[in-house]
Image: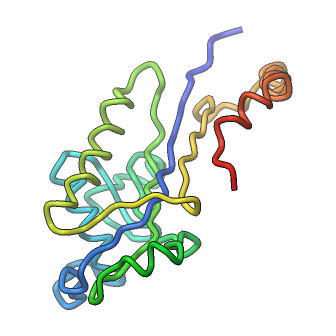
Amino acid sequence: MTALMLTIGVELEFLIVCPYELLDEDECEYDGILPIQGIVYEKLRDAGVRASFEGYANPSSVKTKDDAYGCWQIDIDDSLKLSDVERKAVPQGWASYGMELSSRTFSLKDDDWQGEINTVLECLQSLQQIDCRVLTNESTGLHVHAGFGDEKTPLRTAKNVCSLVTAFSHCLDELHHIS
């Protein structure tokens, strides 16, 4: 049996709080995209990270139809919300947006996935320079997807993963936030 190429992808869910004055839709150069998505896109682009918007044909980021998982996707996620306490702390004249960044598919062996994820996190942190705040709370999350590229997961591997999850579910439970 030949070795399969291990792949991973991550989804970062977070909230951005920023002044309305940054969100002038007339100055957003991307039609049908919220200005905050454009701001995040430009930060990623300036750092050399290929990104696109969900359902947005951005020719500079997606080269071919087969390259759909070849760049980061910037999406609005309306399921992410500020808590009541957080909402009361937001200054008047500021807005909040739930956002999701989905990574490209990384080869675990061949790609510098750790470096690229760090670059993306640094881009999010740099939003503070323009008076935006990135927040996480119990409505946000981090998802890690593992696979074998375009190959199907072998049945034996799937069974082994299920056995490990069952055997160590108490350890996994300890990693989760108590709600």
Say which quadrant the C terminus sits in: bottom right
Q: Residue at x 57, y 40 (%)?
A: 144
Which residue reaches farthest top? 1
> In this view of the protein, which residue sits in the foreground, 95 or 87?
87
> In this view of the protein, which residue sits in the foreground, 81 or 50?
81
On the image, the x and y values in percent for residue 176 come to 66, 43
Q: Residue at x 73, y 28 (%)?
A: 171
On the image, the x and y values in percent for residue 27 come to 16, 85
Classify residue 162 as left or right of residue 52: right
Q: Quadrant of residue 146?
A: top right
Coloring applied to the structure:
rainbow
Is residue 84 depicted above or below 8 in this figure? below
Is residue 122 depicted above or below 82 in this figure? above
Classify residue 5 as left or right of residue 106: right
Classify residue 168 as left or right of residue 57: right
On the image, the x and y values in percent for residue 5 come to 56, 22
Q: How many marks?
A: 0
Say which quadrant the N terminus sits in: top right
Q: Residue at x 47, y 28 (%)?
A: 107
Q: Residue at x 34, y 52 (%)?
A: 63
Is residue 60 depicted above or below 22 in this figure? above
On the image, the x and y values in percent for residue 9 come to 51, 40
Classify residue 64 as left or right of residue 144: left
